[in-house]
Structure formats: C-alpha cells, structure tokens
Image (cartoon, rainbow, N blue to C red):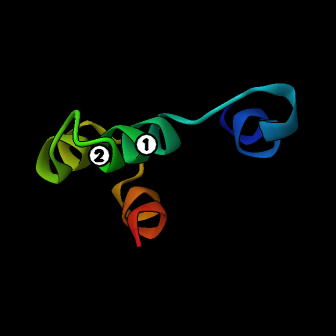
Amino acid sequence: MRNAMLTGGDDGMITLERSLATRVRERLIDRETALRTAIDPGLLLHLLV
C-alpha cells in the first residue's frame, strides 16, 4: 500500500509525510508535531528541505 501511495501521485494519492510537510509549510502544525506523527520522519525531513 505504501509503495502504491509513493508512486501514485498522478492518481491523487498522497503520503502522510507529504501531507504533513504541506501543513508545516502552511503553518497549520509545527515541525516537531509533524515529525512525531510521521511514519517515516526521514522522508518528512527530506520534504521539508
């Protein structure tokens, strides 16, 4: 399922990490909360660069 979401962006699929990164950029949640929530914190950090 996770691989399908990682490769299914063209089909509207989005990972938790991508969604969290968007919310951090929109200042709806802070970075620490996002990192605690993420399944893959390393991926989240990569997306936030």
Question: Which residue appears at 47% of the width and 34% of the height?
Answer: 16
Question: Which residue appears at 63% of the width and 33% of the height?
Answer: 14
Q: Estimate how packed mark 2 is, as few (under 14), some (14 to 19) or many (20 or more) residues with alpha carbons within 10 Å.
A: some
Q: Which quadrant of the view contains residue 1? A: top right
Image position of 31 (left or right of 7)? left
Image position of 36 (left or right of 18)? left
Q: Which residue is mark 1?
A: 22
- Whether residues under marks 2 and 1 lie with C-beta atoms below 8 angstroms apart, the answer is yes
| Callout 1 amino acid | Thr
Question: Which residue appears at 36% of the width and 65% of the height?
Answer: 45
Q: Estimate how packed mark 1 is, as few (under 14), some (14 to 19) or many (20 or more) residues with alpha carbons within 10 Å.
A: some
Q: Which quadrant of the view contains residue 49? A: bottom left
Which residue appears farthest toward the right when viewing the image? 10
Number of labelled discs?
Answer: 2
Q: Secondary structure at mark 2?
A: helix
Q: Where is residue 34? Give x, y as percent.
A: 24, 43
- Frontmost residue, 32 versus 41: 32
- Frontmost residue, 7 versus 19: 19
Q: Is residue 38 above or below residue 45?
A: above
Which residue appears farthest toward the front when viewing the image? 26
* Mark number, residue 10: none
Q: Where is residue 27? Give x, y as percent.
A: 23, 42
Question: Which residue appears at 71% of the width and 34% of the height?
Answer: 5
- Frontmost residue, 24 versus 4: 24
| Callout 2 amino acid | Val
Task: For marks 2 and 1, give the CA distance.
Answer: 5 Å
* Mark number, residue 24: 2
Q: Is residue 16 above or below residue 45?
A: above
Q: Secondary structure at mark 1?
A: helix
Q: Which quadrant of the view contains residue 37? A: top left
Which residue appears farthest toward the bottom when viewing the image? 49
